Amino acid sequence: GHEAACITYLRNLLAEAGIPSEVFALDPERPSLVARLRGSGDAPPLLLYGHVDVVTTVNQTWQHPPFGAEIHDGMIWGRGALDMKGGVAMLVAAFLRVKAENTPLPGDVILAIVPDEEAGGSQGAGFMVAQHPEQFAGVRYALGEFGGFTLALGGRTFYPIMVAEKQICQTRVTVRGQGGHGSMPVRGGAMARLSRLLRRLDQQRLPTHITPTVHDMLTIMADAVGGATGLVLRQLLNPRLTETALGAMGERGRVFEPLTRNTVSPTIIAASDKINVIPSTITVDLDGRLLPGQTPDDMLRELRAVLGSEAELDVVAFEPGPARVDMGFFDVLGGVLKAADPTGIPVPLLLSGVTDGRFFSRLGIQTYGFTPMKLPPEFAFTRAIHAADERIPVEAVGFGADALFAAIQKPRAG
C-alpha cells in the first residue's frame, strides 16, 4: 500500500524531463501512472510496465536497512531491489533517455507504473485493463518482469527471457476427525490425518508435464552445454526420467522442478482457536500454481492421487494465465542481449510465478519478462527475491537500462 509517494516521485521526474503523464486510481493512495513518447507510427506501440509495491520485511533480519537503498560492496540493498524497484528504475531510465537524446522510435512507447502486483493486482494492472484499456490500444508487445537475468550452467551463460507464466490455483484441503477436550487426547483425529497429508505432499511430486516453452528452453541449453550436464537437461524432458534428473542436479534442480509440473505449497493452516479444544475440522490452504494449458480440474485430480480419500479438496481461487505465447519479438530481444554480452545465450522462460502479464494478455498483449541483469555467477538471484538482504549489483541496473534503451528502438511487427 501507499504507493502514491513513489508514483508522485516518478511523475515529478517525468515532468522535469518535459514528459506529461496521467494518473488513474481506485484508491488515491494506490495510483497508476501512464506516460507516452511518440514514435514514427511505423510500428505498434510498445508497453513498458512495472510495479512499485513490495512485500513485507516483517520477521526478517537484514544486514542493512531494508528501505534505505544503501550501496555496499557494489550492491544496492533494500526491499524491492530485485522485485521490482530495480526493474522500474531500468524502465524509467531508458524512457527518460529516449526523451533526453531525442531518440527516433519506430512506434510509440508507453510507460505504465502500477501498484498492487504483490497482492493480486486488482488495484493496479487489473484495474487499468478493465477500466482504461484505451491507454494500451494497439499494443502487441510489452516488456516487464521477470527475465533477462544471467543463469550460469555447465560453463555457459544463459539469459532466460520470460515468455509464459504459470497460473494461480489456490486450493483448500479440509480434514475432519473426532474433536474434544484438550485434556483427553484423541488418537487418529484430524491433526493426525493432517500430518499424514502434509508428509505426502512433502515426499511426492505431482506428475511431469513438459510445455513447449520448457521444451525449447531445455533443448537450447542442452545443446549449448553438451556433455553430462546436457544429458541431464535432456532427461528432464522425458517424464520417465525427470525425477532422476532433478535428483542428479541437486540444488540446481530447485530452479527447474516447478517448470516441469503443477505445484502446491502449504501456507496457511486453520484449526482450533482455543488451546484446550481439539479441532474436529482443519483446513490447509495450498498456494497452487498450474502450468499453461492445465485446468483446476487437473490440479484436483493430481492432488487426489497423492492425498487419497482422507482429504476434501476445493479450488478457492483460479486466475487463468495468458492463453498463448507470441514469440514475434523474442529474437529481437535476444539479439539485444547478444550484442550486450556476446557470450550469452538467450532462452525462452516459463516463469514459475505469476505477473501482471496475465491482465495485459486479456488485451492481446504478449509480455516478455525483460529487465536484464548481468549477475555474478555466485549471485543467488532466485533466493534473494522476497528474502532478507535483497540486493542488486549497481552495474546490473545500468546493464538493464542500456538493454531496454536498445530494445525500444528496434523495429517490431504489427
Image: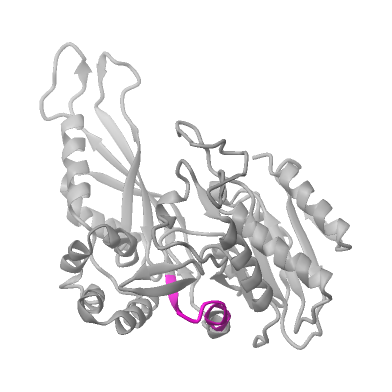
Name the residue located 60 percent from the left edge and 59 percent from the top edge.
87
Camera-side residue: 143 or 262?
143
Q: Report x, y in % for residue 144.
A: 59, 65
Q: Report x, y in % for residue 370.
A: 56, 69
Task: Give the position of the N terminus as an image quadrant.
Answer: top right
Q: How is the image coloured?
A: one colour
Residue 77 visible? The answer is yes
Horizontally, residue 215 falls left or right of residue 137, namely left
Look at the picture and state if 30 lies above or below 250.
above
Horizontally, residue 295 falls left or right of residue 202, namely right
Q: Quadrant of residue 181?
A: top left
Name the residue located 41 percent from the left edge and 73 percent from the top edge.
157
Q: How many marks?
A: 0
Q: Report x, y in % for residue 30.
A: 70, 44
Name the residue located 45 percent from the left edge and 31 percent from the top edge.
59
Name the residue located 40 percent from the left edge and 51 percent from the top edge.
383
Look at the picture and state if 104 lies above or below 131.
below
Residue 134 visible? The answer is no
Q: Residue 151 in magenta?
A: no
Q: Quadrant of residue 362?
A: bottom right
First to last magenta residue range:
335-349
Task: Give the position of the C terminus as an image quadrant.
Answer: bottom right
Q: Report x, y in % for residue 266.
A: 32, 43
Which residue, as the protein is rendered here, is positioned at the far top? Answer: 183
Camera-side residue: 354 or 132?
354
Horizontally, residue 150 falls left or right of residue 407, namely left
Camera-side residue: 56 or 263?
56
Which residue, as the protein is rendered here, is positioned at the far left? Answer: 187
